[in-house]
Image (cartoon, rainbow, N blue to C red):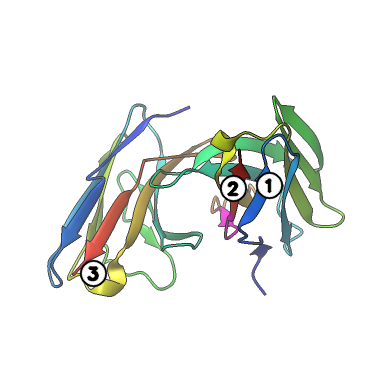
C-alpha cells in the first residue's frame, strides 16, 4: 500500500488567481495521477505525471491551465491557473502499484469565488 | 452510452440488511475490477479488486464479476451505519494503458 499526503485540504480562492496542490507519497512510484471530482459526480482524470517527462493530459485538459510538476518519484504538484468558478471541485492525486490498484490522497476541496 | 454505468442512488437500507451494489460496462477488454469506498470529504479507498471473472470475499464484503454479462457486484453483509458512504466501481484493461474507467458512484445510507 501507499500513504499519500495531499495539501491543502481545502481553499477558497479569488477568480483569476492560481492554486498549487501538493502530493507527497511515502514510497517511490513511477506514475502519479491527478483527478477532478465535481459534486455528486465520478472521477475525471486530468493527467498522468511520470518522473522525468512531460505530463500526459486527457482530452479537455491543457498544460497552460493545469501545469504539473514531478521533480522526483515521491512528489508532484498540480496548479490550477487563472481560476474561475467552474474550477470549483475536489482535486485528488493518486498512485498505482502494479496495474490493478490505486491509492488516493484525501483531496483538495477548491472553491473559487 | 458511458463505458461504465452505475446507479447514483441514494440507496437506503436498514442496519443489518444485505446490500447489493452493481455496475455494468460495455468494454469486453476490461479485466481488472475494483470497488472503492468514499466517505464525505475524503479520498476514495480501495475496498476490493478482482481479476477476470469470479468471486472474492473479504470479511463482510464480496465482489462478484460476470464477464459474460459485463456486470459486477459488491455485496455487503450485516450492513452497519459506518458503511454509509459512496461506493465507486472502476475497471481497466490492464494493458499498457493504465487508465481506470470509473462509475458515477452509488450513495449508500444505512439506517440505524
- State left or right for residue A105 relative to residue B70: left
Between disc 2 and disc 3, the foreground one is: 2
- State left or right for residue B2 relative to residue A23: right
Q: Residue at x 34, y 54 (%)?
A: A91
B102 up-or-down from B61: above or below:
below
Q: Is residue A1 magenta?
A: no
State the residue position of label 1: B13
Confirm or deny contact between disc 1 and disc 2 (CB under 8 A).
Answer: yes
Q: Are marks 1 and 3 on the same chain?
A: no
C-alpha gap between disc 1 and disc 3 = 46 Å
In the picture, the quarter occupied by the N terminus of chain B is bottom right
Residue A22 drawn at (x, y percent): 24, 44
C-alpha gap between disc 1 and disc 2 = 6 Å
**Secondary structure found at label 2:** strand
State the residue position of label 2: B109
Which of the 4 image quarters holds residue B49? Answer: top right
Residue B19 drawn at (x, y percent): 72, 43
Q: Are marks 2 and 3 on the same chain?
A: no
Between disc 1 and disc 3, the foreground one is: 1
How many C-alpha atoms fall within 10 Å of the one at disc 2: few (<14), some, or many (≥20)? many
User: Sequence order check: which comes first, mark 1 or mark 2?
Assistant: 1
Give the extent of the magenta segment.
B100-106
Q: Is residue B93 visible?
A: no
Q: Which mark is residue A64?
A: 3
Q: Residue furthest top?
A: B59
Amino acid at each position: 500500500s501507499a500513504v499519500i499526503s495531499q495539501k491543502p485540504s481545502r481553499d477558497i480562492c479569488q477568480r483569476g488567481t492560481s492554486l498549487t496542490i501538493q502530493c507527497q507519497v511515502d514510497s517511490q512510484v513511477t506514475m502519479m495521477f491527478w483527478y477532478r471530482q465535481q459534486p455528486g459526480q465520478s472521477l475525471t482524470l486530468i493527467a498522468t505525471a511520470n518522473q522525468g517527462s512531460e505530463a500526459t493530459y486527457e482530452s479537455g485538459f491543457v498544460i497552460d491551465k493545469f501545469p504539473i510538476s514531478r521533480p522526483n518519484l515521491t512528489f508532484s504538484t498540480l496548479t490550477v491557473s487563472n481560476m474561475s468558478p467552474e474550477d470549483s471541485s475536489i482535486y485528488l492525486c493518486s498512485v498505482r502499484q502494479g496495474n490493478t490498484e490505486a491509492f488516493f490522497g484525501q483531496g483538495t476541496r477548491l472553491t473559487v469565488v | 452510452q458511458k463505458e461504465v454505468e452505475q446507479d447514483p442512488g441514494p440507496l437506503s437500507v436498514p442496519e443489518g440488511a444485505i446490500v447489493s451494489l452493481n455496475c455494468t460496462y460495455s468494454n469486453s477488454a476490461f479485466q481488472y475490477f475494483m470497488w472503492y469506498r468514499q466517505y464525505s470529504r475524503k479520498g476514495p479507498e480501495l475496498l476490493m479488486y478482482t481479476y477476470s471473472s469470479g468471486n472474492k470475499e473479504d470479511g463482510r464484503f464480496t465482489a462478484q464479476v460476470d464477464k459474460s454479462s459485463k456486470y459486477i457486484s459488491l455485496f455487503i453483509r450485516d450492513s452497519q451505519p459506518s458503511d454509509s458512504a459512496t461506493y465507486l466501481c472502476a475497471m481497466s484493461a490492464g494493458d499498457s494503458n493504465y487508465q481506470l474507467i470509473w462509475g458515477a458512484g452509488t450513495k449508500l445510507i444505512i439506517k440505524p
